[in-house]
Image (tube, rainbow, N blue to C red):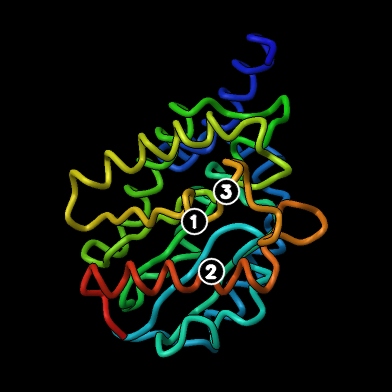
């Protein structure tokens, strides 16, 4: 990536931090383009209530199109909040509307688009910095709820940047391991083929989104981790 374009993108992505803290800077269009999606969540939050037994599962498109999520994650009671191609900057900006100060059994987050093999990619350290900011945003409203981060799954489409994705995941995992209320749900190894590549049998034709087998695998990983962490239904 061109150093100048990378620096410009980083500045753009972090505008929202000064906007939230001072109210003097407007968030960039790359963040505001999700306003309609978040407004839909506002509407859902008026009619969908959570309690101490609810598992909030939120993040990018893999969460949004998980049509069988309630069945797959049963017996957990699930509140589903996924949208488009969510990235850490916009998710953190809208966190106060996505993650309400309701009671939750746990908050489970999957955001996988900050390193995608395109010019606008963030570095692993930038992803990690945004993750820490997201934790701060969530903790303002949900100070004691277990916060679980699902590791970005290796996909055939983005295999060329899998090393960078793993580096970002490693930074987040190390940070989570230092905090009792933060959890890292490891998924990478479970989606690797015997040849050592991303296993295409778990993905749709786009080689990016999970198919039915991929979601069943995901659900099993998530539930096993929650149970082992004593986050039970």
Q: Is residue 61 left or right of residue 69?
A: right
Residue closer to the observer: 11 or 208: 208
Instruction: Tell me which numbered mark, 1 or 2, is placed earlier along the sequence.
Output: 1
Q: Quadrant of residue 64?
A: bottom right
Say left or right for 111 vs 146. Answer: right
Separation (CA) of disc 2 from disc 3: 16 Å
Using the image, tell me which numbered label, if any, was put on residue 190.
1
Q: How far apart in space, not on screen, are marks 1 and 2 (Cα)?
A: 8 Å
In percent of width and height, residue 211 lies at 70, 68
Front-most of residues 165 and 10: 165
- Toward the top, the furthest residue is 3
Alpha carbons under labels 3 and 1: distance apart: 11 Å
> Disc 3 designates what residue?
194
Quadrant occupied by the C terminus: bottom left
- Mark 1 neighbour density, 10 Å: few (under 14) some (14–19) many (20 or more): some
Circles 1, 2 touching at the beta carbon (< 8 Å): yes
Residue 47 position by quadrant: bottom right
Q: Position of residue 222 (x, y in %)?
A: 42, 68
Q: Position of residue 68 (x, y in %)?
A: 62, 82
Give the residue at x 53% y 69%: 217
| Mark 3 or 1: the one toward you | 3
In this view, 150 is above or below 88: below
Q: Nearer the viewer, mark 2 or mark 3?
A: 3
Indicate which disc residue 217 carries: 2
Where disc 2 sits, the SS reads helix
Q: Residues within 10 Å of mark 3 (few under 14, many from 20)?
A: few
């Amino acid at each position: 990536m061109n150093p100048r374009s990378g620096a410009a993108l980083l500045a753009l992505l972090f505008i929202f931090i000064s906007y939230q803290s001072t109210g003097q800077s407007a968030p960039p269009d790359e963040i505001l383009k999700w306003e309609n999606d978040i407004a839909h969540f506002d509407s859902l939050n008026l009619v969908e209530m959570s309690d101490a037994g609810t598992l909030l599962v939120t993040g990018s498109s893999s969460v949004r199109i998980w049509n069988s999520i309630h069945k797959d994650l049963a017996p957990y009671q699930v509140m589903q909040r996924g949208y488009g191609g969510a990235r850490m900057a916009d998710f953190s900006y809208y966190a106060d509307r996505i993650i309400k100060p309701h009671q939750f059994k746990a908050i489970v987050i999957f955001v996988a688009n900050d390193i995608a093999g395109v010019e606008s990619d963030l570095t692993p350290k930038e992803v990690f910095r945004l993750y820490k900011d997201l934790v701060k945003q969530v903790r303002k409203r949900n100070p004691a709820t277990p916060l679980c981060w699902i590791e970005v799954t290796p996909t055939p489409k983005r295999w060329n940047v899998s090393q960078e994705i793993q580096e970002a995941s490693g930074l987040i995992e190390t940070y989570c391991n230092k905090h009792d209320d933060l959890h890292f749900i490891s998924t990478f190894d479970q989606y690797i083929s015997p040849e050592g590549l991303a296993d295409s049998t778990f993905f749709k034709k786009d080689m990016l989104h999970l198919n039915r087998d991929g979601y069943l695998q995901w659900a099993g990983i998530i539930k096993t981790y929650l149970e082992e962490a004593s986050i039970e239904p």
